[in-house]
Amino acid sequence: MRSYLLIGSVIWCFVACSLSANQEKSLNRAIIQYQNAFNKELTILEASQTHPCVIDAHLSDTAGLKKMFIHPEESIDNFSILHIEKQGEQMKVKLSFDYLSSNNQTNATKKIIYALSSNRGESWFFLEAKHLKYVPCNRFKNH
């Protein structure tokens, strides 16, 4: 048991150390805000934290866009960082959340959500793994 804790701590330190203190602070704040928006069904706040490329891709389907943010009796909790990628100003963090729904009350399943930043971790947007195909878009390119 003790060796698992030590190995977990070393892995966590390795992952956490790949972000600067300011990036980690910014990411943690954004995750907590996104998690609260998701869990409390704060649709407008959740939509504002969703990656703009995902919103752009669903803009023509208003009903589908609305449906993306309606998830009653579902919640996410206990996130962990699985992977961090950096390329210039672009950052992508793969997160795993415990996912609970009224359909599956006995066991939490895992939900993969990505946090993306285009400004070295100053601000973050979120999207589910199934929406990665919509990124990149022209939203953040300089004109």
Image: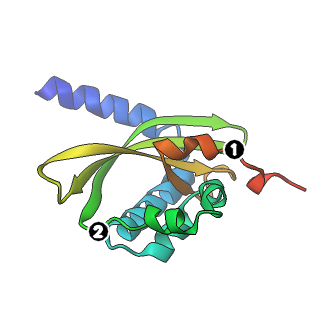
Q: Which residue is mark 1?
A: 136
User: Secondary structure under badge 1?
Assistant: loop
Q: Are marks 2 and 1 in contact (CB under 8 Å)?
A: no
- Where is residue 76 shown, x and y percent of the image? 30, 57
Please tell me which residue is depicted at 23% across the width and 66% down the height of the picture.
73
Q: Whole-Å distance between the Cαs marked 2 and 1?
A: 30 Å
Which sits in the foreground, 89 or 22?
Answer: 89
Look at label 2 and name its amino acid: Pro
- Where is residue 10 shown, x and y percent of the image? 33, 29
Residue 90: which quarter of the image? top right
Look at label 1 and name its amino acid: Pro
Q: Which mark is residue 72?
A: 2
Please tell me which residue is depicted at 63% across the width and 46% down the height of the picture.
134
User: Secondary structure under badge 2?
Assistant: loop
Side of 8 relative to 116 (left or right): left
Which badge, 2 or 1, is on the more N-terminal residue? 2
